[in-house]
Image (spheres, rainbow, N blue to C red):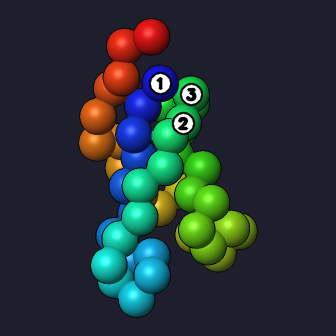
C-alpha cells in the first residue's frame, strides 16, 4: 500500500489517497490529470 499526493487538489491545498498501484491514477481530476501526482510513502502490509 502506498500514499499518493496531488498538490493542485482543493484549490492548491493538496490531497492524499491510498493506492495499491505504483502507477499514479489520480482520483481528484479524473481524465484531465489522471497521471499527475506522486507516491510519497510506502505502507508495509
Residue that carries the numbered disc 3 in the rendered image: 20
Q: Is there CB contact under 8 Å for labels 2 and 3?
A: yes
- The reply to whether the C-beta atoms of the residues labelled 3 and 1 are less than 8 Å apart is yes
Q: Which picture quadrant has residue 31?
A: bottom right
Q: Earlier in the sequence, mark 2 or mark 1?
A: 1
Q: Is residue 18 above or below residue 33?
A: above
Residue situated furthest front in the rendering? 45
**Lower position in the chain sequence, tag 3 or tag 1:** 1
Q: Are marks 2 and 1 in contact (CB under 8 Å)?
A: yes
Q: Residues within 10 Å of mark 2 (few under 14, many from 20)?
A: some
Q: In x, y percent, where is residue 17?
A: 49, 49
Image quadrant where one finds the C terminus:
top left
Q: Which residue is mark 1?
A: 1
Q: Position of residue 20 (x, y in %)?
A: 56, 28
Circle 3 packing at 10 Å, graded few (<14), some (14-19), many (20+), is: few
Q: CA distance from mark 2 to mark 3?
A: 4 Å
Q: Residue at x 41, y 46 (%)?
A: 4
Residue at far right of view: 31
Callout 3 secondary element = loop
Residue visible at 28% across and 42% down?
40
What residue appears at the point 41 percent right and 64 percent down from the top-left corner?
15
Callout 2: helix, strand or loop? strand
Residue 33 locus on image (x, y percent): 57, 69
The one nearer the camera, 45 or 36, is 45
Q: Secondary structure at mark 1?
A: loop
Tag 2 residue: 19
- Reply above or below: 3 against 6: above
What residue is at 47 percent from the left and 62 percent from the top?
36
Vertical relation: 33 (above or below) 3 = below
| CA distance for labels 2 and 1 | 6 Å
Alpha carbons under labels 3 and 1: distance apart: 5 Å
Amino acid at each position: 500500500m502506498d500514499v499518493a499526493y496531488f498538490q493542485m487538489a482543493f484549490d492548491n491545498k493538496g490531497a492524499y489517497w491510498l493506492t495499491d498501484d505504483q502507477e499514479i491514477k489520480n482520483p481528484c481530476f479524473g481524465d484531465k490529470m489522471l497521471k499527475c501526482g506522486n507516491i510519497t510513502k510506502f505502507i508495509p502490509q
